[in-house]
Image (spheres, helix red, strand yellow):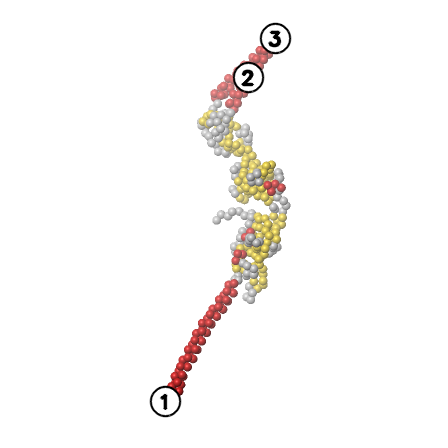
């Protein structure tokens, strides 16, 4: 049978075409898998991004309320006794007797201590005897002058001698008196600093005496406050020693001079202190009511986000329920104008009304329209008169 080249070509072309088709199908499958996977990945990533774009945020909330606020001016002052002094003697000497105990309450003029004064008292008696003799001589000469038995000059000499003797007695009496310590005013004694038999130099501190009821509190206010305060105005003072107790008093004096360095004016108030709880040297927070009460919408200070372009709060709005019947809550940003603060609270002058539900914690995660979940198991402080808490 003669050789036909077309038969050979046909035999070769058949298997080659089949392999080519298989390769093309395999390549198509691989490309489909690759591009399909990338498309699926992109789809899933996009779906995940949409899911995480605005997830619900957990926040705490509080309903804004309206409260009556009394405008006040506050300052920190120091307590000072109405009368207070460290008692000492003008003269030196040895302590003879002590008539008080530490912590006693004494009245004005009470003898507290004496120094040894035997020599001074003896000298006083001698001078007194001389003065008595001079008085007798003067009386005798005055009788004799009536019958012209002595001259008028003699009587004048006797009178001058008597006055001189009496002056010496008074001088010596003053020396004796200086060795006796008396309370210059009524008050509460401190801790005794001397003992019997101790030698004291002049001016040595013996004991402190403080008049504690009433007691002064001195504080300073800026000059702008001068239009709001007056003598006789009520003040309230608190000290950290007794955080739950207030001490009421009145403004006693306003310094007529404003400090040119600080532009502050010194004010003094008098506080009742019958139980002697307040002591000189303590510091106190002083509050003065000024003006009339004002009505404010108030929220916790933590609810306000302070920004250079304006202060904002987030309100929680009810958008109905989702497909599962759960409430849909969304956060809505609102710009507000803030007013004075009191404790943990701040007054809102404009921007929200009483009754609005305000986010008090977690607002840093929010934006307009963010879904929220309310959890008030832990809420920020919202007290108008907070006190330090010990952990």
Classify 10 Å Cα crowding around label 1: few (below 14), some (14-19), many (20 and above). few
**Vertical side of 240 occupied by 311: above or below:** below
Q: Are marks 1 and 2 in contact (CB under 8 Å)?
A: no
Report which residue position mark 1 lands on. Answer: 3
Report which residue position mark 2 lands on. Answer: 164
**Vertical side of 205 occupied by 224: above or below:** below
Judged by depth in the image, the label closer to the viewer, 1 or 2, is 1
Judged by depth in the image, the label closer to the viewer, 3 or 1, is 1
Q: Tell how many labels.
A: 3
Report which residue position mark 3 lands on. Answer: 148
> Where residue 46 sits in the image (x, y, percent)?
50, 66
Name the residue: 53% across, 21% down: 171
Residue 138 seen in the figure: no
Judged by depth in the image, the label closer to the viewer, 3 or 2, is 2
Q: Quadrant of residue 28?
A: bottom left
> Where residue 173 sits in the image (x, y, percent)?
52, 21
Q: CA distance from mark 3 to mark 2?
A: 25 Å
Q: Considering depth in this image, is 285 or 102 the residue closer to the camera? A: 285
Q: CA distance from mark 3 to mark 1?
A: 203 Å
């Amino acid at each position: 049978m003669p050789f036909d080249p077309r038969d050979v070509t046909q035999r070769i072309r058949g298997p080659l075409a089949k392999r080519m088709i298989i390769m093309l199908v395999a390549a198509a499958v691989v490309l489909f898998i690759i591009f399909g996977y990338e498309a699926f990945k992109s789809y899933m990533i996009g779906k995940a991004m949409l899911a995480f774009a605005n997830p619900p945020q957990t926040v705490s909330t509080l309903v804004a309320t309206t409260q009556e606020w009394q405008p006040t001016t506050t300052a920190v002052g120091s307590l000072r006794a109405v009368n207070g002094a460290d008692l000492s003697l003008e003269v030196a000497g040895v302590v003879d007797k002590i008539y008080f105990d530490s912590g006693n309450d004494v009245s004005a003029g009470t003898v507290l201590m004496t120094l040894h004064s035997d020599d001074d008292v003896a000298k006083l008696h001698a001078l007194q005897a001389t003065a008595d003799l001079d008085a007798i001589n003067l009386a005798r000469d005055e009788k004799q002058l009536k019958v012209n038995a002595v001259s008028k000059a003699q009587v004048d000499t006797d009178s001058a001698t008597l006055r001189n003797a009496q002056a010496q007695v008074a001088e010596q009496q003053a020396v004796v008196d200086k060795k006796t310590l008396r309370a210059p005013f009524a008050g509460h004694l401190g801790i005794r600093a001397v003992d019997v038999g101790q030698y004291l130099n002049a001016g040595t501190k013996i004991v402190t005496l403080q008049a504690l009821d009433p007691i002064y509190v001195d504080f300073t206010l800026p000059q702008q406050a001068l239009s709001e305060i007056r003598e006789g105005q009520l003040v309230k003072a608190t000290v950290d020693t007794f955080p739950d107790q207030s001490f009421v008093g009145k403004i006693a004096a306003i310094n007529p001079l404003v400090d040119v360095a600080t532009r502050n004016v010194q004010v003094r108030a008098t506080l009742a202190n019958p139980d002697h709880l307040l002591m000189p040297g303590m510091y106190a927070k002083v509050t003065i009511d000024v003006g009339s009460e004002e009505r404010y919408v108030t929220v916790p200070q933590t609810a306000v986000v302070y920004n250079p372009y304006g202060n904002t709060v987030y309100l929680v709005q009810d958008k109905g329920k989702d497909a599962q019947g759960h409430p849909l809550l969304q956060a809505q940003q609102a710009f507000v104008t803030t007013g004075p603060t009191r404790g943990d609270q701040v007054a809102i002058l404009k921007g929200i009304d009483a009754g609005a539900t305000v986010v008090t914690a977690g607002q840093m995660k929010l934006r307009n329209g963010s879904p929220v979940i309310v959890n008030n198991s832990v809420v920020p402080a919202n007290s108008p008169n907070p006190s330090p808490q010990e952990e």
